[in-house]
Every structure is written in structure tokens, then in C-alpha cells.
Amino acid sequence: MSYATSGALSVQLLGPLRVWCHDDEIVIGPPKQKALLALLATHRGVVVRREEIVDALWGSEPPATAANAVHTYVAALRRALGPARSDRGSGEVLVTRSGGYELRLPVEAVDAALFVRQHEEARRLLAADRAEAGYERLGMALGLWHGDALAGVPGPFAAMERIRLREMRFAALEEWVGGMIATGRGEEAIVVLNWAIVQEPLREKLRYLLMLALYSCGRQAHALQVYGDTRTYLDKELGIGPGAELCSLHARILAGTVEGSPPARLPRQDRVPAQSKGWTGAAVASGVTPSHLPSRADIFVGRTAELRSVRQILTRDSPDRGRATPILAIDGAPGVGKSALALELAHDSLDRFPDGHLYADLGGTGDAPLSAFDALAQLLQSLGVERTSLPADLDGRVMLYRSLLHGKRMLVVLDDALGADQLKPLIPQGSACLVVTSRRPQRGLVVRYGAHRIGLKPLDLATATALLLALTGAGRGTDRLSAVERLAELCGCLPLAIRITACRLLGDPYGAPERLAALYEDPAARLDLLTVDGDDDMSIRSVLTASYRNLSEEAARLFRTLCRVDPDEIGPLSSGRLVRTTVAEAASHLESLVDHGLLERVGPERYRLNGLVRIYGAERAEAQTQAMALRTTRKLPITQARMGVASAGARGGGRRLTQPPFKMAEFRPPYSQ
């Protein structure tokens, strides 16, 4: 790949070392080569002598091959950063000078240089009593950071430069946070300071500012608690007490003599101020209200009770609103309509969330569930954070996400969640509302965060019939009500199966409910018909497989047995007898099947199989039986062949079998388990 002029290049030093040409990232190579680029970028426009390069990369004891290695690294960097050249002359970006090398890049192309310039400009503006512009510039400077400077870059120079830049970063952050507190943004400052203190626990100025921010928000007790925690920490770590500034602020808070009253909050702005992004290193687009919800179903029938209860929660004006994030956790069997209900609720409530609506498909039932790290990347980009400005670590992304949502009336929908480890980093704080769908009950959200859980079951027969009529057209279905009702029953009253059936009826000009119902009566054909060509996610068999493959071996064996036997009553005692296990173990496996949506609880220690689930489980049982039979059959010829060889040798003929008595291809395993 060839590159244009140096103006197209940008070098990131404030985080992991990365280089871009326009939107394409350039691969720099091995660590020492990165260290050389970091050195040249830090001294851009200045000739760096070869001796200085050797000292910077290896220190006082360089290897004998250091000089040759420098030539090799320079040549590789020149190929990566500049256009391909047939001659041995200098490229446009990396130039050879007498005794050394020079990287010719403007200030704007190196984030560390731009940070220093913007920090200096901010200080000049503040000195000239232009506070608003000065704090805006500080926020822009801090917004260039993506983690620890020169992360992963080796060598003595990188180590010293990392310390220097980190000190400048936190000095700028202290100035900027002070501006936030002075302009009435104490709540935002608290979020930033909590993160910063974790990074620099011995920096007393950060703790001073946190006490001041808490006091400015009317949280005097919390401010005093910070002082107590600081005193305990310093005594434990260093055997010293807090400094004079902290002690003085503590005394003034106790006496109520902190200068000035807590400032009034600034009026709300439509754009995210630069201050809200600076501490995490994220460039945030302004003037955009995110709205990323997928479309809801054109026809939605039923779930009246669930919709009513959730609407009451969303419309309730509680004095504690903002203290904790309202969370709705929707779970249920495969195909029961969890996502459809979540989107129906979300679209019904758009006016209650004027700050925006976010959506992420977490892929919990797929082969590769989305990690919290990657999910945060999607959500942050939906909030306007540029891809190249995303924090490089999970904690940084979490803090930025919560900071941007702080105080916002925003709806977040997380579809198809896997579990607590995936969800916890994605839970916002305060006035935002979170809607989670998951196949398994997220009881941890209920216990930890007080989430409102909605456990969905299949529709009742009347509602399922009404949905099928609505999807196919009332005029067409009214005359054939009994056939439509039978179809809904054969679909197990699952909304997904009903929608697939409606699609099949509408797509066949000669189709009739009676004819399709007759085909569905055959269990062997029903799951084959409940598919959508080209979309595996819209197949009853595939959505059930996603749950089945997550079962333990014992639970899967019980599931297959229940579906094959189809007992009149399912409970721990009868199930334990079927699979020859204890009642307690059987009860645990039954609950696991319920959690995975493959069994429905209908009373105390009473369970029921949905018709479609039973057909699927019987298929799995048959496949398992065939697989075991094939494995047994496969072993038999091999044993006989070995016995034949031994007998021939015993007779003295010395004859050996040169070909197996069968071909392995003849014994193919059935449908994957």
C-alpha cells in the first residue's frame, strides 16, 4: 500500500502506539521499531543522532549489532510510512540527515505534540480571564488520550517519556476538573475524579478536588468520608497524614466556612461539552441525539398485562429516580417473543427518553457472543465517540460510557444477553433506563440492581390464534377459524412459529390453513416446515439447538429421555427414575431445562413440554441412539479384522490385511450433536 504526503499520516503516542494514513492503520512492526518511531515522533522536525537512538532503545549496554539494527529499523519504517521508492534516497516523511534522522510531521499529526500545545494554549486563555475558552481547550487536550502513553513500547526513552506525559496529563486534568467544579458541573467532576484517583491514589490534589466537588453538590458527609479514607490510606501506605491543603479543606467543611456557596448548575446544553470527554480520551460528536432502535413488528398481538405493568414503571415519577437505573429483564423460551416485546416497549416509550435510544445485539445464543469490551465499542460509537478515540481498556470504556450517560434520560436496549459478566459493565447509572432480553433468567440483575423481571411464556391459544389471523388477514382466516386455531396449537403457541406459518401461508397462492395443518400433523415434517430459507435465525430447530448445546451432559440426557418417553406428568421423582438419578439431581436438571427455555414450569414440582420442543428433543434422542449404534458397529469390524490378522499369522501363512474390511466414509455420523 502506498501513501501520500506526510499530511495524511497521524501518530498516536497517548496510548498504545498506532499510526494511520487517512482511515487505514499502518503496521509498524516489532517493539524496537515502535520505540524508534516513538523517539522520532516525539522529536519531530529535529534531527536525532544515531548515538541518541542507540541510547534511547538499549540504554547504557547496547549490543554490538545496535548500529546495524538501527539501519534496519529505519529502512522498515521508511517503507511503512512513505511511498514505495526504487532508489535508496530519503522518503518524504523519514529523512536522513548528517549523522541522524528526522521525522517530518506537523504538530497536528502527533497527538502528544498537539496535547502539549493545546495545554499551553489553555493556560494562556485562563491567564487572560477567558475561562470558558480555556476549559474548553483543556477538554480538547485531554480528549486526545487513549490510555497510558506509549503503552507497550520498550526502551529507556519510552519509560521516561511515559512518566513525563502522565504527569502532564494529570496536571491538565486537575486544572480542568477545577473548572468543572467552578462552573457548577460538580456531579460530572465526581465521576472523573473517582476514575483518576484509582489511577493515581497518592495524588492528594485529586482527593482535594473530589471533596470540593462533593461539597459543591450538597454531599457534605461524603466529602468528609473522602478525607477519612485518604487519611487511612496514606497512613497505611506511607505512614503519613494528609497534607496541609486537605486538612484545611476538611476543617472548613466541618465549620461550614468553605468560600462561596455551591454554584448553580449551568443550563443544559444540547451538545456534549468538551469537559465530558477529556479525561477518557474520546472525541465526541456534538449536536446528535442517538436513535438506533431496530424497527418493531408491524403487527403485535397480546402481552397486555406485561405491557401495562412495564408502562407503569416507566411512567412512575419517583423521588428516587436518578438514584438507581430502572432495569427491565425479559426472559423466556426460544421463539417466545422476547425481542418483539422489548422493541414494542421501547418504541412505545420514545417520548419519555428525549436524550436518545441505544441498541446492541449481544449475540448470547450465537456461536460468538459479543464481549462487554466490544459491546461498549458499539454503544460508544452510537453516542458519537470516534472509532479511533475509543479507550483501549475495558475500565476506560466503562467509565466513558457511564460518564456520557450520566444525568441523561436515555433508553438502552441490550438484546440476547448471555450472563452477568457480559452485562455488568453495560449497566448505566442514574436516569437512563435499561431493557435486557435473555433466554436465561438474569436473577443477578434482580438481586443486585432490583431489576423488574418479566418471564414470558407461550401465548394462550386464543391470543395465538388472533395473532395468526392478524398476520394472514382476518377475512381469509375467519371462515377457517378451526383450521387456523389448530395451526396455532401445532405451533406450540410460540410467536416465532406462528409468524413463520403466516409467512408460509401468504407466500403460497394455493396454500390453505387446512392443508398446512394436515402437513403439520406429521411431527417428522413440522420442524422442517417451520424454517425460513436463507435465515437460520428464523428456524425453530436452530433456535432450540442454541439452547440445547448449552446444557450439561446430564441435563441433555434427561431432556432427550423426557422427549422420547413423553410422560403424562413431569416432576423430580418421575424424572429421577427415568434417568436413574437422585430426586435432588433430577430437580436441578429440570430447573436447568426451564432456565434454557426447553421446559415450562406449570406448578410446584410440575413441568410441561411444549409440543415443538418435544418433537425437537425426540429428534435429538433418535440421533443420539443412531450415533451410539454406529460407534458400536464401527468398532466391530475393526476387532474382527485384527482377529483375522492374528489367526493368519498363527497358521504360519504370514498373510496381512493390506486394506480395511470397510471404508470409513460408509460410516458417517448423523446430525451433529
Image: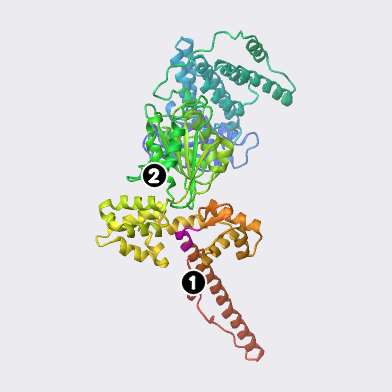
> Can you see residue 99?
no
Q: Which residue is drawn at 60% across and 83% down?
A: 640
Image coordinates of residue 453 in percent, x first then y, are: 51, 41
Give 250 or 81, whichever is nearer the viewer: 250
Magenta segment, prevailing SS (helix, strand or loop): helix
Q: How is the image coloured?
A: rainbow
The magenta stretch spans which residues?
609-615
The residue that disc 2 covers is 1
**Mark 1 or 2, closer to the camera:** 1
* SS class, disc 1: loop
* Amino acid of disc 1: Arg
Q: How many marks?
A: 2
* Amino acid of disc 2: Met
> Can you see residue 446?
yes
Categorize mark 2 by other alpha carbons within 10 Å: few (<14), some (14-19), many (20+): few
Image coordinates of residue 101 in percent, x first then y, are: 49, 33
Categorize mark 1 by other alpha carbons within 10 Å: few (<14), some (14-19), many (20+): few
Give 533 or 55, whichever is nearer the viewer: 533
* SS class, disc 2: loop
For the residues labelled 1 and 2, the Cα–Cα distance comes to 47 Å
Give 390 or 302, whichever is nearer the viewer: 302
Which comes before the other along the chain, label 1 or label 2? 2
Q: Is residue 611 magenta?
A: yes
Q: Are marks 1 and 2 in contact (CB under 8 Å)?
A: no
Image coordinates of residue 227 in percent, x first then y, are: 66, 19
The residue that disc 1 covers is 668
Q: In this view, does 3 lie to the left or right of 545?
A: left
Image coordinates of residue 633 in percent, x first then y, are: 55, 77
Image quadrant where one finds the N terminus: top left
Give 610 or 19, whichever is nearer the viewer: 610
**What numbered label is drawn on residue 186?**
none
